[in-house]
Structure formats: structure tokens, C-alpha cells
Image (cartoon, rainbow, N blue to C red):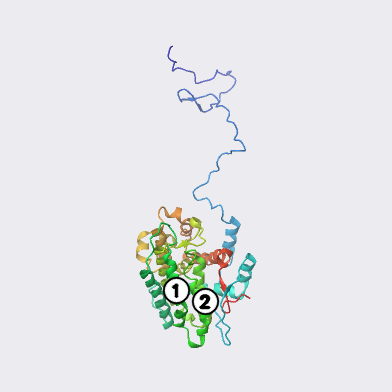
């Protein structure tokens, strides 16, 4: 049999001279050369098996709210600071309990005086640290020093309660031992700084304190527990134990020490993120240090939001600025490209100044933490934070 000739026609029969030829791009099935034959018609995709929808890497997560929700956060007013009203006798301290069960309950709390004042307290703490480094001198009362010593003691307990050998990735059971020691000593710790006439308040503030460091049953930690720590500080402000002149030290001494404790707990006992949005959230565990940290950097001469991508800045200044410390910690525990494992933080780095970052963080904290039922259903109400 003769071999097939490699010479074959790549053109259809010549059309009449009066008809202009149109070049149609297709390939010869034998040699792959371009031809002027019309390509065969493609059958339409069936409705049963349509072509796959292209999803870029940065496409929004399926379970995120629609864009109009994000727009509502952007257009919302920036929360303002408020003075915390201190209590006066007669006192009616009581064991706090959970009250929030539905979105209507959330709206009731947010619109109440208690809800507005609690958020105003967080804003006041943010304003107190504005433009200050962590190491800056500030008023440190004996009460603040006592808070710091208590948290130092909690940090030392981690060294004497080593993690158990286990195969699971999250939730080391030794954390339950650490937390049980906390609950056993919580009341005694509160009595270290409460004046004699306010020692009965321990029944109300101890539950907030115990819930500030994670859940021993689930062995997890999230923004709800962090909010409990803010609520504990707010209760102490209501009692008059914390005064306005203490606010800067509350952030730069007490909260920074609390952050150090929580990071050690997270790393040693592998606490699971509670209610994390994963890659589409701000951070797996924390929110408040981004608020306080962005306030620290407002009007900084050299560091801008985009400076988080400069490794030298992170290494040299993360010990002085909470926001940079948070970014450095995220880069330490998460591997890969920053824009892929932390897209929200990467997007925020494109904001022109820290003032906008801070106001956006405050609005986001209200919408993403204080207005979320899964988080706030564990929030406690008593006589100091009232369910009105």
C-alpha cells in the first residue's frame, strides 16, 4: 500500500470571483497547519452539564453576606467614645446570665444604653492609645500593676502544665487543667484589687474574667472571649476601679499582657479558632488589637497601612505597635502568600491612612462581633451590664 501523500489541499474550492473570500481560522486534522475551511459547528452544552463557572482565587466566599451588607458597614456612622457611668450604693450585684438568643435580642442590646456605652468604652480605650507606642510612659496605678501581675501568673501556669501528647491537631486536653486552675483561683484574684466595700462585686465580674480565655469544653478561643475580657474591664470601670486616667495603661500594659497570654495559650495548647471565618475573616482569634493598634499609628510620619508588607518594619517595630505585632504573628503561624491566606488584611493595607483603618475597624467590630448572634449569645448580663 502506498503511503499517504503529505500534499493535501488546505483550501475549499475557489469561490466565484465576484464573491470575496473570508479567512476562517481552523486547523488541518492531519498536519495541524492553518486552513481556510470553516470549523465544524460545536454542539451546545447540555443543561445537565454546563461548562464550569470560572471562579478567581479572590472570589468572595459563598457564605459571606451580599455586597449591600458590606456597603451598609461602610456607610454606617463611626462609633463615638462615651464616659462610663460609675455605680453608687445601694449595690445589687448578681451572677450574670445569658440573654441573647435572636437577631431581635441583638438589636435590643445594640440600641440600649448598656450596648451603646460598652461600645463607647471600647472607642475610648482606642482613643487613649492614639499616637502612643506601647513603651511610652503613662499613668500606672497600683490596680494596673495588680492586673499585670495576675496575667503574669496565668502565663507562668502554662510552663508548669505542659501540653499532653496527642495526635489531634487542635485542642490539647491539658488546656482544661489550666482553665480549671483559673476557675479555682478566679475569685481570689479579684479580691486582690477590689476595695472592701466592693468585694461583693466578685460574684458578677468573675464569670466575665473566667470566660475571657477560651472555652474548656470545646478548647477554643475567639472574638467572643476577647469581648468578655473587654466586658470585664468595662465592669471594673463601672465600679470605679479603673478610671479614665488609667485607660492608656489598660491598653498598653494590661491588654498587651493579655494578648501575650492568649498567643501562648493558642500556640502551646493549640486552641481551635471559635467561629472563625477562615481566610475571609480579619483574624482567626482577635479583633481588638487591630482597633487599638491602628489607633497607635494614626498620623505616624513614616509608617502607612502598606508598611505591613515591609519585613524590616515588622521585625523592628512589632514590639511597639499592636497592629504590626498582629501582622507578624499571622505571618508566623500561616504559611504561603499573605494575600491568599489573609486577603482582608491585604486589602486593608491599601487604605490611604490609619485614621480610615481605625474608623473602619470600629464599624466592623460593631457589625461583625457585637451584632452577631453566634458570638453574642454567650455574652453575660447582670447588674453592671444590664439587660434593659
Evaluate if marks 2 and 1 touch, with contact meaning CB atoms under 8 Å apart: no
Q: Could you tell whether 42 is left or right of 142 in the image?
A: right
Dot 2 crowding, Cα within 10 Å, few <14, some 14–19, many 20+: many
Q: CA distance from mark 2 to mark 1?
A: 20 Å
Q: Nearer the viewer, mark 2 or mark 1?
A: 1
Badge 2 is on which residue?
234
The quadrant in which the N terminus is found is top left
**Tag 1, which secondary structure?**
helix
Say which residue appears at 45% left-offset and 53% top-offset. 340
Say if residue 171 shows up in the picture. yes
Among numbered discs 2 and 1, the one appearing first in the sequence: 1
Residue at the extreme right? 104
**Tag 2, which secondary structure?**
helix
Query: Which sits in the foreground, 376 or 86?
Result: 376
Query: Which sits in the foreground, 147 or 204?
Result: 204
Badge 1 is on which residue?
182
Amino acid at each position: 500500500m502506498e503511503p499517504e501523500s503529505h500534499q493535501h489541499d488546505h483550501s475549499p474550492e475557489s469561490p466565484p470571483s465576484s464573491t470575496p473570500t473570508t479567512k476562517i481560522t481552523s486547523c488541518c486534522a492531519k498536519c495541524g497547519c492553518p486552513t481556510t475551511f470553516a470549523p465544524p459547528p460545536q454542539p451546545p452544552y447540555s443543561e445537565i452539564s454546563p461548562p464550569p463557572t470560572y471562579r478567581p482565587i479572590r472570589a468572595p466566599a459563598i457564605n459571606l453576606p451580599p455586597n449591600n451588607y458590606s456597603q451598609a458597614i461602610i456607610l454606617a456612622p463611626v462609633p463615638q467614645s462615651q464616659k462610663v457611668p460609675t455605680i453608687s450604693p445601694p449595690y445589687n450585684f448578681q451572677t450574670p446570665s445569658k440573654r441573647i438568643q435572636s437577631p431581635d435580642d441583638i438589636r435590643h442590646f445594640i440600641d440600649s444604653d448598656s450596648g451603646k456605652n460598652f461600645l463607647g468604652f471600647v472607642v475610648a480605650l482606642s482613643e487613649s492609645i492614639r499616637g502612643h507606642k506601647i513603651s511610652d510612659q503613662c499613668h500606672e496605678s497600683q490596680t494596673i500593676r495588680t492586673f499585670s501581675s495576675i496575667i503574669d501568673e496565668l502565663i507562668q501556669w502554662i510552663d508548669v502544665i505542659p501540653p499532653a501528647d496527642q495526635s489531634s491537631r487542635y485542642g490539647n486536653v491539658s488546656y482544661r487543667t489550666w482553665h480549671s486552675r483559673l476557675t479555682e483561683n478566679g475569685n481570689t484574684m479579684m479580691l486582690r484589687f477590689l476595695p472592701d466595700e466592693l468585694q461583693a462585686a466578685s460574684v458578677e465580674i468573675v464569670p466575665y474574667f473566667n470566660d475571657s480565655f477560651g472555652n474548656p469544653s470545646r478548647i477554643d478561643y475567639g472574638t467572643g472571649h476577647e469581648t468578655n475580657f473587654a466586658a470585664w474591664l468595662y465592669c471594673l470601670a463601672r465600679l470605679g476601679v479603673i478610671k479614665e486616667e488609667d485607660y492608656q495603661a489598660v491598653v498598653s500594659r494590661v491588654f498587651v499582657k493579655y494578648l501575650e497570654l492568649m498567643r501562648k495559650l493558642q500556640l502551646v495548647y493549640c486552641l481551635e479558632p471559635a467561629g472563625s471565618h477562615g481566610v475571609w475573616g480579619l483574624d482567626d482569634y482577635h479583633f481588638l488589637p487591630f482597633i487599638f493598634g491602628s489607633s497607635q499609628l494614626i498620623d505616624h510620619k513614616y509608617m502607612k497601612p502598606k508598611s505591613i508588607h515591609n519585613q524590616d518594619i515588622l521585625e523592628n517595630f512589632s514590639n511597639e505597635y499592636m497592629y504590626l505585632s498582629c501582622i507578624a504573628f499571622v505571618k508566623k503561624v500561616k504559611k504561603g502568600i499573605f494575600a491568599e491566606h489573609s486577603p482582608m488584611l491585604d486589602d486593608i493595607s491599601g487604605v490611604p491612612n490609619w485614621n480610615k483603618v481605625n474608623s473602619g475597624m470600629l464599624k466592623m467590630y460593631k457589625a461583625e462581633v457585637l451584632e452577631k448572634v453566634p458570638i453574642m449569645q454567650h455574652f453575660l448580663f447582670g447588674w453592671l451590664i444590664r439587660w434593659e
